[in-house]
Image (cartoon, grey):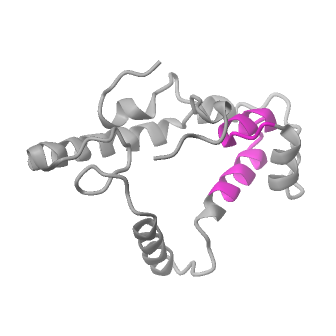
Amino acid sequence: MVEPKTGSSVRTVVLPKLAVRYLREHRKRQNAERLALGDAWREHCLVFASSVGTPIEPRNVNRRWDELRAKAGLDWLRLHDLRHGCASFLLAQGVPARAIMEVLGHSEIGVTINTYAHGVSVEAPGSSVISRVRAPGTIHLCSLSCGHSHA
């Protein structure tokens, strides 16, 4: 594991309710795997871990991504394009650019707008989409995985 690039890289990320639900379901499956493996499980407090609890090898992530996108007929889609698409979608839905900037971890609003706007209006006063996107509370990702408490 490596330290984050900057101090602001360690942050609370607001997640949609749907994402929180799926992450909780994932935690239940992972806890079952942890129990089934017993002492063979190597705890690293990861939300997404290998089948034995260790960090996932990047080549395995890429291999699985290639399988999924081929199955979906999206051979042109890169993994990083998901980040790009999410940001553009949120902008199109009227989520304030500053909120998207915080989710993406950009230090300057110009980076978010110049990289992701693509002709989408970033001004959407009175939009209620943020209330649908934001979960009612926050959830620390590590608490999803191993239940450890972090400040």
Give percent across and percent down for residue 2. Answer: 51, 45
Looking at the picture, does residue 26 appear above or below residue 83? above
Residue at 70 percent across and 57 percent down: it is: 84
Q: Which residue lies furthest to the front in this view?
A: 2
In this view, the residue in front, 40 or 111, is 40
Please state the total of marks drawn on the protein image.
0
Nearer to us in this view, 6 or 69: 6
Q: Position of residue 95 (x, y in %)?
A: 74, 38
Choose top left, top right, bottom left or bottom right for residue 127: top right
Q: Is residue 48 magenta?
A: no
Name the main secondary structure of what is drawn in magenta: helix
Q: Along the horizontal axis of the image, is 66 left or right of 127?
A: left
Locate residue 30, reporting x and y percent.
25, 46
Give me the residue at 47% from left, 41% from top. Answer: 18
Q: Quadrant of residue 50?
A: bottom left
User: Residue at point 63% right, 36% down?
Assistant: 9
Residues in magenta? 83-107
Q: Which residue is drawn at 42% across and 22% down?
A: 150
Q: Above or below — where is 62 with respect to 47?
A: below
Left or right: where 63 falls relative to 2? left
Using the image as rendered, state which of residue 95 and residue 107 is in the foreground: 107
Q: Where is residue 91 in the image (x, y as percent from the top left)?
A: 77, 46
